[in-house]
Amino acid sequence: MLTDAIKLKVDRRDGKLAMAHFYVAFIALAIGGLAGLLQVLVRSGKFELPAGIGYYQILTVHGVVLGLVLTTFFIMGFQISAVSKTSGTLTNRQRVTGWIGFWVMTLGTVIAAVMILLNEASVLYTFYAPLQAHALYYIGLTLVVVGSWIDGAVIIMKYVEWRKKNPGKQSPLLTFMALVNTFMWIVATIGVAATVLLQLLPWSLGLVETVNVGVSRTLFWYFGHPLVYFWLLPAYMAWYAIIPKIIGGKIFSDSLARLSFILFLLFSIPVGIHHQLLEPGIDPAWKFIQVILTFLVIIPSLMTAFSLFATFESFGRSKGAKGLFGWIKKLPWGDARFVVPFIGMLAFIPAGAGGIVNASHQMNQVVHNTIWVTGHFHLTVATAVVLTFFGVAYWLIPHLTGRVLTKKMNKLAIIQGITWTVGMTFMSSAMHAAGLLGAPRRSAFSEYGGAAQAAEWIPYQIAQAVGGSILFIGIILMLYIFINLAFFAPKGEQEFPVGEAANPAEKAPMVFENWKLWIGITVLLILFAYTVPFIDLIQNAPPGSKGFKLW
């Protein structure tokens, strides 16, 4: 049995490991946020970058630092602390493994960042052949991925240790969820590791002259779509298992939560081709099959929505709420730990609807290469996920540093969440609208030779700049709150809230813990979805492409 001390608080040594991840994550928020602000200002046509800095340079900084660095470091820190809390303090070996993972990721981040800042890797959001970056940039990103695998090994090791000590019992819910996300991440990143090590590195080093762009992009999106769920599942961890405790309620169903995570593991990986619906070289039949598989991912998302609102309503009714929506008044609207993630939940409704549009065979042709997609991306990741991460940080940072979230910081945190929401509403709505008018993504400001259609986009680009500026204020507020909670808040005990199931007698089926079965089905689905398209892309490949450096 775990001691009461472990149940109450994450061990300080594990806390230091988690906090190291959070320090890098919030430095990334500052750098990536500034790059995002500069982007929207440039796209408004009212601002030019100083000192010879290129637009695509800051675009790459924004994409890599926020899309990969902030998210991966925050998720690993959160998952390690959640596993330490629910399955017991890490052993010395596990903790050392975690530190090795952290330093490998950090080294990779620094190498990749230096290459971008030297303008040797202005290759869009992460990278996209045939744009060619410096070899050190690819090595840096490889180290980030390898470091995340080492971090993931900590979670797997802790789970295996827990299972040995507790045979026949279901694992703690947060540990189970962290494990599912770790498995999904490892399987997904095999794709990006393959394209970097086997294609892009030899190509950028001059060992081979050309690259098969179709194969490279397919491997990238094999990774790129589950990457979205790697970001999202930690937010779901908070929604399912932590928010119920914060509001004073119970988890609606432990089994439902576990089932939805298993479904994400199965269906989030073999769907990457829906990002390539307008790419040549892939048979339309296989595109259609992956669109169908994509729509299956909607099922666990709808299960999550049902479970969350059932939790909220059950709690409200237990407090005497009457009428159809009376329970809404009973929710703790003065608690930033609930309010900010709740805004993220609401944002995920239009975000999910936009995702259905993007994945639809026909509608995708209207929006595919437009800034609509960027607007969708900012609703899913930059609102639903990031606001939930902020909500987690409000209690987790003081818990790990032995401090407390004061009333003043709680109030400022709510202001921060509202500021973020207002800024994102302006920016994302303008992106969606401009996208429907044909405004392209991945492009700096241009009047396209005075074209009438381009003139229609400019008011929306100015609205994006307004929204981006408000968002940057939200980033400054968040950094202030983080520094306060990490270093200056009063010493004390901040709760790590872990919810309990509404029906403790309801035991989740042990088949959920049968990893040979679930990983086996995942591998079979991937082989089904990708084997024939891959053979096609290799056998019928056009001449490979030389590297392009357009900056």
Image: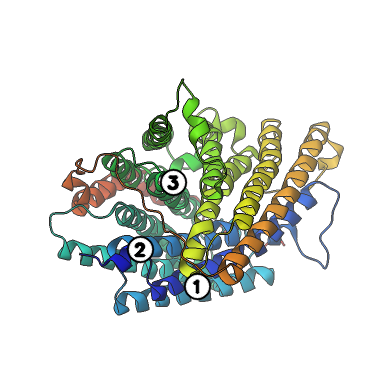
Give the farthest residue toward the left. 168
What residue appears at the point 33 percent right and 38 percent down from the top-left corner? 252
Local secondary structure at mark 3: helix
| Residue type, label 3 | Ile
Direction from residue 456 to residue 3 in the image, left or right = left
Closer-to-camera residue (316/35) = 316
What residue appears at the point 84 percent right and 57 percent down from the top-left corner? 48
For the residues bearing labels 2 and 1, Cβ distance under 8 angstroms: no
Local secondary structure at mark 1: helix
| Residue type, label 2 | Leu
Residue 191 lies, with reference to residue 143, above or below; the image says: above
> Mark 2 against mark 3, which lies toward the viewer?
2
**Where does residue 66 sit, x and y in percent of width and height?**
59, 58
According to the image, what is the colour scheme of the structure?
A: rainbow
Local secondary structure at mark 2: helix
What residue appears at the point 51 percent right and 60 percent down from the top-left corner? 211
**Where does residue 315 sit, x and y in percent of width and height?**
40, 35
Closer-to-camera residue (378/222) = 378
Would you call the spot at circle 3 few (<14 residues within 10 Å), some (14-19), or many (20 or more)? many
Q: Is residue 279 visible?
A: no
- Which residue matches tag 2? 8
- Residue 243 shows which numbered tag? 3
- Mark 2–mark 1 distance (CA, rounded to whole Å): 21 Å
Which numbered disc, 2 or 3, marks the residue that appears first in the sequence?
A: 2
Direction from residue 532 to residue 421 in the image, left or right = right
> Mark 2 against mark 1, which lies toward the viewer?
2
> Mark 3 against mark 1, which lies toward the viewer?
3
Which numbered disc, 3 or 1, marks the residue that appears first in the sequence?
A: 1
Which numbered disc, 2 or 1, marks the residue that appears first in the sequence?
A: 2
- Residue 20 shows which numbered tag? 1
Residue 501 lies, with reference to residue 364, above or below; the image says: below
**From the image, which quarter does the N terminus lie in?**
bottom left
